[in-house]
Amino acid sequence: MELFLNLNNDWKQLVYKNWLLLKMLQYPLDVFLYDDSYGMDFLLCKALEWESNNPEEDLKKLERFVNSRLQHISEEIADSICQMEFIHINSNIDNLSPLSLFNNIKIVDFHGENKSNVNDFIPLAKDRYIYVLDYADYETINFDLRSNITSIPNIKYIKGYGIPLELSTIVCDLKGYNIHNINQGYE
């Protein structure tokens, strides 16, 4: 619980949204990884059945909901969040330092984000492999050109256009995620 409470507000929102969509609501991880058109917030609105003709209002409703939940988060939920193995990072995050405290992280996902100010991957230096996903249909972030990602031996940086073929191998051993059709990757 203390780890969660020490996160700044952007990180609290990010990890809570990841947990809510992929763990609590069990939104299929493969569907999330194959779709880079909407982003996590819109997929959360869809999963919560908050889709209207006014997407901006839907996002405001989601923001109010998340902020309300974060004010009254239980120790059980905070601990569950801190045990996640997968996290999608959005463009609001510019520092990965909190991930050094998430001991079970196996995959850090930037797919479909197109931009990021993250340039230091040292917080992911662990005694096991961590996959960093940077793929999209049109534009990748290109961490290998402007960060220290390639100098950290345990990071497997997966960059490219389209769905990477190795995606099924990467996610197959995640625990507690809804994964049912991940073998559809292409180069």
Image (tube, grey):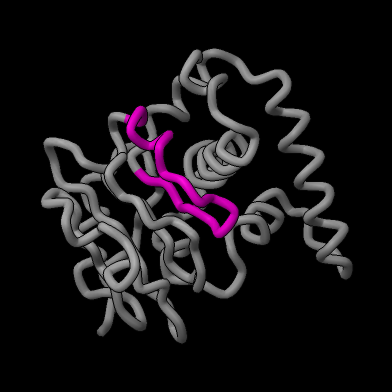
Question: Is residue 186 placed above or below 125 in the rendered structure?
Answer: below
- Is residue 164 highlighted in magenta? no
* Image coords of residue 6 (percent x, y): 54, 21
**Residue drawn at (49%, 60%) of the image:** 117
Residue 42 visible? The answer is yes
**Residue drawn at (71%, 18%) of the image:** 72
Is the C terminus in the top left, top right, bottom left or bottom right quadrant?
bottom left
* Image coords of residue 11 (percent x, y): 56, 38
Front position in the image: 140 or 69: 140
- Numbered range of the magenta stretch: 86-102
Front position in the image: 55 or 159: 159
* Image coords of residue 102 (percent x, y): 35, 31
**Residue drawn at (60%, 15%) of the image:** 74
Question: Is residue 174 placed above or below 40 in the rendered structure?
Answer: above
Q: Is residue 63 left or right of residue 23?
A: right
Q: Tell me the quarter of the picture where residue 131 sits.
A: bottom left
* Image coords of residue 151 (percent x, y): 16, 57
Question: Is residue 178 placed above or below 165 in the rendered structure?
Answer: above
Q: Is residue 43 left or right of residue 23?
A: right
